[in-house]
Amino acid sequence: MNELLRTNDVDRGPLRLAVGFGATVAMWAIGYVAMMRPGLIAGEILFGTMFVVLAFGGYVGGRCAAKAGRTTGARAGAVVGLVSASANLLIVGSLFGSAADRDLASELVLWVGGLYGASVLCGVIGGAIGGSASRWQPRIPATSLFGVITSVAIFLLLITGGLVTGLEAGLAVPDWPNTFGHNMLLYPISQMKGGVYYEHAHRLYGMLVGLSSLALLVLVARLEGGRLVRTLAAVGFAMVVVQGLLGALRVTGHFTLSQDPSQLAPSVALAVLHGVFGQMVFALYCLIAVLCGRRWKGESKYASFDPSRGRRSSSILVVVLLLQLISGALYRHYQIPVLDGPPSYPKWAMHLHVTGAVITFIFTLFVGLRTMGVPKSLRPLPQLGHGILMLVGLQVALGIASLVLVIVRKSPEIPIAEVVFTSLHQVTGALLLATSVMIAAWWRRVTVSVGEPARGD
C-alpha cells in the first residue's frame, strides 16, 4: 500500500495533465455540436456546459490532490485549467482571425487572457469544491488515463471524418495547410459554414490529436520503463503525423499552398488510405492505454489450457477486420457523381463489402464466443469477448440500415439519416478493430499454469 501511495504521489502532476486534456476533449466535442447551430437556446446551453465540464475537471483534480483542503484542491484545479487553456490555444485564433480592421495584438491579448482567466477560474472553483471532499486514490496510472483520453480524441476525429465523407464535404476546403489562404489556426469562425465547417473542424481535431499524442509520448518516455510501450508511443506519434499528411495530400495531391484547382489533384486512393489508416491509429492507441494499465503490469494470467489457438484466431481476426474496413472504404469513396441524382456506387465494391461482411461476422462470432468462454479469472478476456459480440451485432444492423438508405435515395440531397447511419457504421468498425487488437494482446498474456498439463481449447 505504501508503495502504491508513493506511486500515486509521483503521478499526481501527470494525472492533472491528463484530466486537463480530458476536459478539453469533452469541451471540443460539445463545441462541435454547438457549432452545428442547433438553435439559440440549445447553443447557449451547450456553451454553458463547456464551463461546467471544465469545473468538473478541476473538481476531479481537487479530489485527487495529495492532501485534503480547499486551498490544495484549488491549486490542483488551477493546473487543470491551465492545461485546458493551453490546449485550447489551437482554436482561440479563429475568434479574432477576422479582425483585419482592428489591432490584432490587442485582440490576441484579450482573447488569450480571457481564455486563461476563465479556464483557471473554473478549475479553481471545481478544485476547491473537490478539495473539501474525501480523497480519491487514483486507480489508473496517468499514462493509461492519457492513453484513454487520446484514444477518445482520435475516436472523435474519426466521427468528424465520417461526417465529412457522409456530407461529401471532403474537398470543401481546397488548400492545405492553409484554409482559403488563411493560417489554419486563424481561419475566422464566422466563415465556418456548411461543408467548410465540417472539413475545417476535422482539421482542427487533427491538431488536437497531434498535441495529445505528443504529450502522451513525453509522458510514456518519462514514466514507463517498458521498451514495447515506449516504442509503440513513438510509432503512434509518427502514425498521427503520417495520417495528417495523408489527409493533406488527399486534398491537394502534392505539397503546395496553391488554391488554384488547375494545380491541385485530389486523390481518391489517398482518401481510402487516410480513412483506414486513421482506424489503425485508433486501435494502436487503445492498445497503448492497455499496456500502460495496472492490470497489464500485474501478474501473468494463468490457465490450465493451451492458449495458442486463441492467439492465432484473434490475430487472424485483426487481419480480417482490417480487410473488411478497406472494402468498406473502397465502397464509400469510389462513388461516381451524378448531375441530377444521388451518386452511383461501384457494384464490385458493394459485392466485395457485403461478402466480406458475412465472412467477418462468422469469424468474429467464432472468436468472440471462444474468448467469452474462458474462465472469469482471465479478466478482461471474457468481457472483451462479450463486447465484441455486441459490437458485431450492432455493426450488422447499422450496415443493413446504411445500405438500404443508400439504395433508396433518389435525390442529390443527402438525407440526414443516411449521414448518421453511415457514419455510425464507420466508427463502429473502428471500435471492432480496436477491440480485436485488445483481445489479441490479452490472449498473449495467458500462459499455462505451472505443473498442470496443457490441453486444447
Image (cartoon, rainbow, N blue to C red):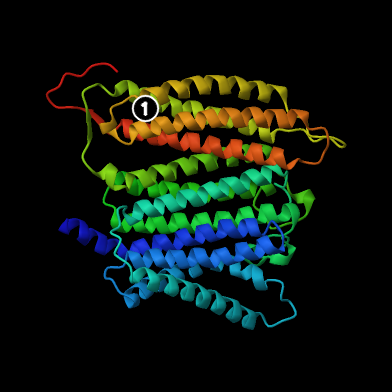
Disc 1 is placed on an element classified as: helix
Q: Which amino acid does label 1 sit on?
A: Met
Residue 428 is drawn in which quadrant? top right
Residue occupying the point 66% across, 73% down: 96
| Residue 276 sits above or below residue 90 on the image | above
Q: Is residue 15 visible?
A: yes
134 lies left or right of 251: left
Q: Nearer the viewer, residue 253 or 425?
A: 425
Q: Which residue is most to the left? A: 451
Q: Which residue is most to the top? A: 456
Q: Quadrant of the N terminus?
A: bottom left
Q: Position of residue 151 (x, y in %)?
A: 46, 48
Residue occupying the point 86% across, 37% down: 339
Q: Which residue is most to the right? A: 340
Q: Where is residue 258 in the image (x, y as percent from the top left)?
A: 73, 57
Q: Residues within 10 Å of mark 1 (few under 14, many from 20)?
A: some
| Residue 340 sits above or below residue 116 on the image | above
Which residue bears the numbered disc 1? Answer: 372
157 lies left or right of 232: right
Q: Quadrant of the C terminus?
A: top left
Q: Where is residue 229 in the image (x, y as percent from the top left)?
A: 33, 46
Q: Is residue 331 visible?
A: no
How many numbered marks appear? Answer: 1
Q: Where is residue 108 in the image (x, y as percent from the top left)?
A: 61, 78
Residue occupying the point 42% across, 50% down: 148
Residue occupying the point 28% across, 71% down: 68
Q: Which of 274 and 446 is in front in this view?
A: 446
Residue 3 is drawn in which quadrant? bottom left
430 lies left or right of 76: right
